Image (cartoon, grey):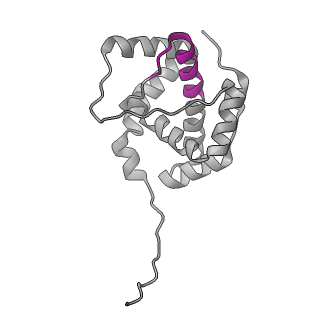
Amino acid sequence: MRSIPHNIEAYDNAKVRTRFGEYYDLSEGEVDKIFTAMKVFLFVSHRYMMETGKRLRIVDETFVIDEMWHNFVLFTEDYHAFCHEMFGEFYHHTPAVTNVETISIDELSEQLQFIQAYVGEDRLETWYSTWAKTYNAREMHKKRILPEIEFEPAEAE
């Protein structure tokens, strides 16, 4: 199995974890696992791009990892520093252009084999099967807590 550099898994950012946990009302343990998965996914995704010239595609099963990535990107300075420290360059998040983009079975199979070479079968199973049931888009949007905003009454003109 290929290895994940220690500094990837050791990196921490309490601001990113706290915001994500509060936004989705998740336990600290859940957030820690998702944050670690996102860091590892970013590393593997960057390696895939360097080795194949292609980007790993985010699929529905990895929705929660992508959501954590979105959250991390909001902390632009921290994300920028992380990328340069870990990858030697900025690693852009490139979203799908439409909701109907598809991935072929062959492309998905190639990506899953590449990911498994780094994370092993158990972690791959967690990300693409277990979490697909627990942290899919529908379940995550049920968990989302939007802050209550109090507005002052508008003044009559």
Q: Position of residue 99 (x, y in %)?
A: 29, 36
Which one is in front, 91 or 115? 91
**Quick check: is 43 in the magenta stretch?**
yes
**Quick check: is 81 in the magenta stretch?**
no
The answer to which quarter of the image holds residue 37 is top right
Determine whether 21 is above or below 113 in the image: below
Q: Position of residue 127 (x, y in %)?
A: 46, 28
Instruction: Identify which residue is drawn at 49% across, 35% down.
Output: 65
The answer to which quarter of the image holds residue 76 is top right
Q: Position of residue 86 (x, y in %)?
A: 69, 27
Instruction: Identify which residue is drawn at 38% across, 49% down.
Output: 141
Determine whether 133 is above or below 51 in the image: below
Which one is in front, 106 or 145? 106
Q: Position of residue 129 (x, y in %)?
A: 40, 27
**Most prominent secondary structure in the magenta stretch?**
helix
Considering the image in quadrants, where does the N terminus appear? top right
Considering the image in quadrants, where does the C terminus appear? bottom left
Instruction: Identify which residue is drawn at 53% across, 38% down.
Output: 69
Instruction: Identify which residue is drawn at 42% across, 39% down.
Output: 135
Drawn side of residue 35 relative to residue 52, left or right: right
The residue range painted magenta reads 40-56
Drawn side of residue 157 relative to residue 54, left or right: left
